[in-house]
Image (cartoon, helix red, strand yellow):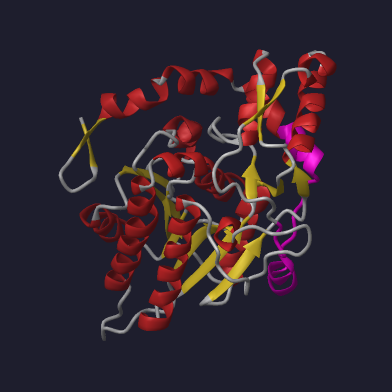
Amino acid sequence: MRSLQNVLVTGGAGFIGGNFIRVLLEKTAEFSGRIVNLDALTYAGNRASLEDLEGPYGGKRYFFEYGDICSRAAVEGVFEKYRIDTVVHFAAESHVDRSILGPEAFIKTNVMGTFILLDTARKYWRDSGGALRQDVLFHHISTDEVYGSLGETGTFSETSAYDPRSPYSASKAAGDHLVMAYHHTYGLPVTLSNCSNNYGPYQFPEKFIPLSILNILEGKPLPVYGDGRNIRDWLYVEDHTRAVWTILRQGLRGEKYNIGGENEWENIKVLHVLIDIAARKAGLDPEKLRGSITYVTDRPGHDRRYAIDCSKIKRELGWKRELGFEEALGRTVDWYLANPGWIEGIRTGDYQKWIEQNYEKREDGMGELR
């Protein structure tokens, strides 16, 4: 088992990265090291998602740095200040629709940002003789979307050919290739994981499940792309974070691991289950809610089906998902019901005012406290 001491989590104010930090600090007895959260706090980054960790862990085991992974000076500053020995790279532009409307930001963050992180790690992770250390690790979080679209049968495995269909998935595929190239060319110790669609607490409400939950609770129309029969393999975010933790400790260098929920659902069926759960918990009429379902024009390049074969991580590392889909959806609905302040902060934009009130951005890409 590998020991982690000074862990850099990029994009830790985002959905999956924030849940990963929370799980490590609050639910992982084997981890006693420090976490440095480097985040540029773009629209999907919400420092309020981790505010409650500041009291018990801030300045001791948890450190927040406001900065951009596309700034070499910012990344090098974090490596030097905290003596980073592990990188867990979550930071990414991740919404397919936004990538269709504005692909440049995706290329910048997902390709150039990944390159700068890799190159900085290669620079700082050398021993006194100049050789790359092997007690360090760069773990890259990727997506099943790099593999393209499946027909009615089959699954994506670690050896599936890449066939990205959107600017988002193409940028993530490029990042994957850079990570493996740095391993093969320079000997950088890396692991890589490709996950299926995540859901759970703290997810920004532009994604299908949180958007549907909030629309149900607020009596708004429930939009569904196309015929609603696109299929996704749904993975609860805490199951995903446990898988990443397992790879960090046990994964073999230079290996890829697919992480899936083994849980395929058509989008329209997910929506009907959400209606039933939310109606029961909030005292709403499910049949009336079903009347709010609206089929909208499909988005360009909408992949029909994803399905992950995660037998490798189950067989070799002993990971498996813990929660069934409907139980985890229930927990997700409960969280959104219990956190109206978090939702309202996003709706009003107040969640981003913290940046203006506390930081000025320097030329090196880092934030300086006012």
Residue at 78% across, 43% down: 325
Most foreground residue, 28 or 232: 232
Q: Is residue 311 one of those drawn in magenta?
A: yes
* Quadrant into which the N terminus falls: bottom right
Quadrant in which residue 265 is drawn: top right
- 114 shown above or below 355: below
Quadrant in which residue 331 is drawn: top right
Most foreground residue, 282 or 133: 282
- Residue most toward the left? 363
Q: Which residues are magenta?
A: 307-331
Most foreground residue, 192 or 2: 192
Quadrant in which residue 219 is drawn: top right
- 214 shown above or below 115: above
Residue at 73% across, 53% down: 261
Residue 170: x %, y % from top left: 46, 58
The answer to whether residue 60 is visible is no
Residue 76: x %, y % from top left: 25, 59
Residue 357: x %, y % from top left: 27, 24
- 27 shown above or below 75: above
Q: Position of 282 compared to 81: left or right? A: right
The answer to whether residue 200 is visible is yes
Counting the numbered discs, the total is 0
Q: Position of 164 compared to 305: left or right? A: left
Q: Is residue 40 one of those drawn in magenta?
A: no
Residue 240: x %, y % from top left: 64, 53
* Quadrant into which the C terminus falls: top left
Residue at 68% across, 17% down: 217
